[in-house]
Image (spheres, rainbow, N blue to C red):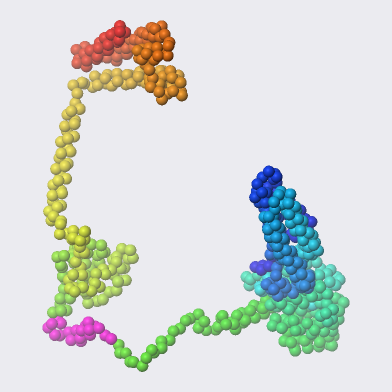
Amino acid sequence: MVVYNFKKMHAVPTAMELIDIVLMRTQRKTPTVIHPGYKITRIRGFYIRKIKFTQQTIHERLTQILTDFPRLNDIHPFYADLCNTLYDRDHYKLALGQLNTARSLVDGISRDMIRMVKYGDSLYRCKCLKRAALGRMCTLLKRQKSSLAYLEQVRKHMSRLPALDPHTRTLLLCGLPNVGKSSFMNKITRADVDVQPYAFTTKSLFVGHCDYRYLRWQVIDTPGILDHPLEERNIIEMQAITALAHLTCAVLFFCDISEQCGYTVEAQCTLFKSIRPLFANKQLIFVVNKVDQQPWETLEESKKKLVEDIIKNDSVTMIEMSNATETNIAKVKNTACDMLLASRVDARVAGNKIKSDLMNRLQVFTPVARDNVERESSIPESVMRRRQQLENKTTPDDEDEIAMLGSKKKKFSRTSNSGYAPTVSEDDGDNQVMEDTEKFKTAREHMWENGGPGVWAPDYREQYDLKEEDWRFDAIPQILNGKNVCDYIDPDIEVKLARLEKEEEQLAKEADAANMEDCESDLDEEEEAAVTAIRERKAIIKKEAHVKNTQNHSVRGRQIRNKPLNKMHEIAVTSSKAIHDKMDALGVDTSKMIERGRKRERAERGRKASRSRNREEKMSDDEEDVDMKEPAGSKTAAKKQKRLDQDLVREEKGSRS
């Protein structure tokens, strides 16, 4: 897991870019039109809003920059010293401090200018104050040109730093330049570090990862270190020194015994002794590299003695290795991982959190006497009586009691087991008491004997502490309005209810039989079919006429026909006398108009009568077709003929009138 991710830092704009961003955003997000004729309060609010928006935009941008950059006092010491080495701690803090000061000054300018705009008495003065406020803010931003440029360069460099975790399992490779550190890293990880036959090919820290024992291991390749005082080391060397000083890791010190790196074995041993304080509390492996060019057995005795002295005095593990032939590469990695893993486990075991015993996981309480009074154990009287019964089983009273307990359960007249699951040993009755058998069974045993969990539940009424033990299994009365419901229940209520239901069923059957008799008709099946066909035909004709009359216009009431929409609420005048009186009052002669209306009404009635007559003739023809098989002297035919005659007479009277 990466603790610090510097790649998510936002870009830092230059001073001019920041000014353009602020002013363009102010112009785009705030109103732009104001007139001298507006109220002075509106004019003041217009310019106050612009000043506030500009100040807020600058504040947000500077706050984002200050938040993105890490505080050196809050991050891991490795990153803090690395930033000090690469960017100079003082310069870094000074740049961030200047931006923080600029942010405070912008806020102060905004407060002062807003206070002055509140007393502006004209548009011109408010506008001048607004320009002065924005100008002073922009001037402050221009003065931060160098700080912003420096922070942008720092951000670019920090985004390229290796994303390493200072707290995870780490293998650190160190030594003089060109001794085979990068080649070893390329062998055990998937990293691709540049390897060249000259010194200081690696100029910064490189991170790779490998797996061992199903764990992820972090491998760090450091630049070469030269043997000279700390003050004379450059930035490239100081990165390796910083990693050695602050990371908890296993250190692999590489030594080129073939001296192809350009440094003698004596110089490499001297470097090891000079940086030996940095290896404190770390697992150290002295890797003798390039044994394919110079085997360890054929090495000069003087050089071999120098290496052996280091190994003997410092208790260092030495392993021979060759990157070219891949000799002992896996052994070096496995040994380093095992040593580091063992040290981490030992550190945890030795700590306060984990101990060899389990006392840190347990919380033990030891009772302490509160006074010097001795308190004896208290045995209930019932237990004492039971003990005596078991000791003296031959007395007559005890035999009678035992016989009573072993007999069948005693039944009570007012007991109830409703709501409780019966046990296997109980009889099929609702009013009974659980048997006290000589062999005691737990509730768990009863549960599994009677169906398991959810099927059987213990009868807790046995544990009731009442004045009389016989009361424990009584049915609990239902109280309503302070009275017992059982006192008001008729004992013969069920018999009476059954009798009443039987009587209701008999009445329902008689009513159904009466309805069947009323529905009987004197028509046979053919007549009933003919009547049904006629009724269906009439319904169809009515629907067709209704559709034909209403398909071209909406149906409106007679009272509002032929009236404008704005006078629909007025009562219509339909009689000729009312029309005559109303028009005479207005001075209009209505004699011809009334006569013309009467003629039109008579003509309309004549057309309606003819249409009705034609429709009746058509219906009579249809009925004749339907009633071809109807007997001539039937009652139904006579009724139909009489009804048709009455309709014709009624229509003729209407046409004459």
Residue 260 painted magenta: no
Please give the range of residues in magenta: 378-399
Q: Label the magenta part by its dominant secondary structure.
A: helix
**What residue appears at the point 76 percent right and 79 percent down from the top-left corner?**
253
Near-viewer residue (173 or 148)? 148
Q: Position of residue 432 (x, y in %)?
A: 18, 67
Instruction: Name the quadrant of the N terminus.
Output: bottom right
Q: Is residue 470 left or right of residue 582?
A: left
In the picture, residue 173 is in which quadrant? bottom right
Near-viewer residue (513 or 232)? 232
Instruction: Name the quadrant of the C terminus.
Output: top left
Q: Position of residue 93 (x, y in %)?
A: 75, 70
Residue 396 painted magenta: yes
Near-viewer residue (124 or 398)? 124
Q: Position of residue 236 (x, y in %)?
A: 81, 72
Q: Is residue 262 visible?
A: yes
**What residue appears at the point 30 percent right and 68 percent down from the top-left corner?**
447
In the picture, residue 415 is in which quadrant? bottom left
In the picture, residue 544 is in which quadrant? top left
**What residue appears at the point 47 percent right and 81 percent down from the top-left corner?**
363
Q: Is residue 523 left or right of residue 304?
A: left
From what the image shows, is residue 597 above or below residue 440? above
From what the image shows, is residue 562 above or below residue 422? above
